[in-house]
């Protein structure tokens, strides 16, 4: 394999454009049950003057660990504007991801343009980075973890292993699905670096013991819940799970993005992007896996190949774990392996670049530019309509925040204000709006006329929320 790119990497410009698109208009993001409950837990903890000890209950039927709630608690000390909170979290996620990609590129000896373009231009990554949620933090933390893993393969320094242990502990607390990272990494290190592990075994033992001490109460709670769910029926057929897991790389592509989060059909001039992008990313991922295994079997593997083999091991553990467990396979689960699939796609791009040098860079540039066009179209749809008809997005955070502030101001003028709700999602779960109203009560708002009644109705296009007042 070649040892890097010396000339200017123009793919970095596309990655920077993707970063800018992620950061602008932070209020055009999702605000549903999980997002509001994470902030609600932080509000309760701050009101009671304590540090949160748990997070929300997720699809594994256990309360996750509190790192994301702690971050919310800290941000609530600075502001009660949820749009500002979402913007700060988005900026932090993007910054951590850039740090992870740059560290990884430096340890592998290649320009970061290709992985940065694949990551920051992907529509799912664009959407996940903006979500004020918990599971999506596995993406930037996973990139930092992979950079430590590559550093350990290169130098064998214990500090890289300590970094992996620390990051893995945080990720498991955020979501227990991150256990697959630990399993896949442990298998790879035992296979490729067992002599290094034996040389200073006591250091690695202490690092593992420290991580286990932090995680043990959490593991015991998870074990109790999993035992209680033993024998639960599968909510998806094995074949449905198998198909979903085989294309876990879709989160690096635009495949079905607009239907999943937007609920609308793309115009004809953008419709080709989703299948073409899916095929391109799938080809890159497969090429990277084949190249790494080939070099490993021939004894010509370098640090990049070893990191790619570790990525395959992590993906294998993820595949086996979710295939065997009786849980619904949701798209956001794939975020736990996104950093590892990015390594495989990057490795595959380098392989194809060496094979067809004139086409690799322009091809990836076209893919990234097309994905940016798709994400921009999606953002404009959200801004124009105040949301999308998809139940996975609905009315945007910004629109719901405007409604909450208007309702709060009106209730200050008339504490007996009657509020009617005709928006189906709010009838089904009023908690997201209730959290925003709590936040609005702590802010200074412009005075409102005295109204007798307020009514929340779906907007004419069915995407957003309209607020009507009766004088």
Image: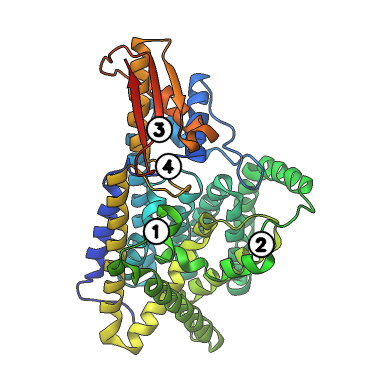
Residue 260 seen by the camera: yes
Q: Residue at x 49, y 66 (%)?
A: 340
- Helix, strand or loop status at disc 1: helix
Separation of residues labelled 1 and 3 (CA atoms)? 25 Å
| The image quarter in which residue 287 lies | bottom left
Q: Earlier in the sequence, mark 1 or mark 3?
A: 1
Mark 1 vs mark 4: give the one in front: 1
Asked if 470 appears above or below 296 in the picture, the reply is: above
Q: How far from the left and from the top, in percent, is residue 193?
A: 58, 71
Label 2 belongs to which residue? 321
Asked if 36 appears above or below 262 in the picture, the reply is: above
Label 3 belongs to which residue? 457
Mark 2 vs mark 3: give the one in front: 3
Asked if 390 appears above or below 186 in the picture, the reply is: above
Label 1 belongs to which residue? 258
Instruction: Tell me the quadrant of the picture where the C terminus can be found.
Output: top left
Mark 3 vs mark 4: give the one in front: 3
Which numbered dot is residue 132? 4
In this orientation, which residue lies closer to the viewer: 205 or 316?
316
Q: How far from the left and from the top, in percent, is residue 85?
A: 36, 35
Instruction: Tell me the quadrant of the picture where the N terminus can be found.
Output: bottom left
Q: Residue at x 37, y 19 (%)?
A: 408
- Helix, strand or loop status at disc 4: loop
Asked if the residue at tag 4 contacts the one at tag 1, i.e. Cβ–Cβ closer than 8 Å, the answer is no
């Amino acid at each position: 394999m070649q040892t890097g790119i010396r000339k200017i990497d123009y793919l970095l410009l596309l990655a920077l454009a993707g970063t800018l698109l992620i950061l602008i208009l932070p209020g055009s993001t999702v605000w549903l049950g999980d997002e509001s409950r994470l902030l609600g837990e932080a509000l309760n903890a701050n009101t009671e003057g304590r540090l949160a000890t748990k997070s929300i209950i997720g699809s594994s039927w256990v309360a996750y660990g509190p790192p994301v709630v702690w971050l919310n608690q800290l941000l609530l000390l600075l502001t009660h504007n949820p749009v500002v909170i979402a913007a700060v979290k988005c900026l932090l996620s993007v910054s951590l991801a850039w740090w992870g990609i740059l560290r990884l590129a430096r340890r592998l000896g290649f320009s970061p343009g290709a992985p940065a373009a694949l990551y920051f231009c992907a529509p799912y990554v664009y959407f996940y980075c903006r979500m004020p949620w918990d599971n999506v933090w596995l993406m930037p933390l996973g990139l930092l973890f992979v950079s430590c893993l590559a550093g350990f393969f290169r130098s064998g320094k214990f500090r890289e292993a300590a970094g992996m242990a620390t990051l893995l502990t945080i990720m498991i607390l955020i979501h227990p699905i991150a256990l697959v990272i630990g399993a896949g990494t442990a298998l790879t290190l035992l296979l490729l670096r067992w002599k290094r592990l034996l040389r200073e075994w006591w250091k690695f033992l202490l690092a593992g013991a420290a991580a286990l001490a932090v995680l043990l109460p959490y593991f015991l709670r998870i074990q109790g819940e999993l035992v209680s769910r033993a024998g639960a029926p599968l909510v998806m057929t094995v074949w449905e799970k198998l198909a979903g897991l085989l294309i876990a790389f879709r989160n690096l592509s635009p495949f079905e993005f607009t239907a999943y989060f937007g609920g609308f059909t793309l115009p004809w001039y953008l419709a080709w992007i989703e299948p073409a992008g899916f095929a391109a990313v799938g080809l890159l991922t497969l090429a990277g896996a084949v190249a790494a295994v080939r070099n490993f079997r021939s004894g010509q593997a370098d640090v990049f190949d070893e990191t790619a083999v570790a990525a395959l091991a992590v993906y294998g553990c993820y595949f086996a774990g979710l295939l065997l467990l009786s849980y619904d396979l949701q798209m956001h689960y794939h975020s736990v392996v996104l950093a590892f699939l990015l390594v495989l796609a990057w490795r595959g791009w380098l392989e194809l670049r060496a094979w067809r040098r004139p086409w690799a860079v322009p091809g990836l540039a076209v893919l990234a530019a097309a994905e940016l066009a798709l994400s921009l179209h999606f953002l404009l749809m959200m801004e124009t309509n105040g949301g999308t008809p998809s139940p996975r997005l609905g009315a945007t955070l910004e629109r719901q925040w405007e409604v909450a502030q208007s309702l709060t101001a009106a209730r200050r003028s008339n504490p007996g204000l009657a509020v009617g709700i005709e928006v189906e999602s709010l009838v089904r779960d009023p908690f997201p709006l209730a959290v925003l109203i709590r936040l609005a009560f702590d802010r200074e708002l412009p005075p409102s006329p005295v109204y007798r009644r307020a009514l929340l109705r779906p907007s004419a296009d069915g995407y957003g929320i309209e607020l009507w007042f009766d004088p």
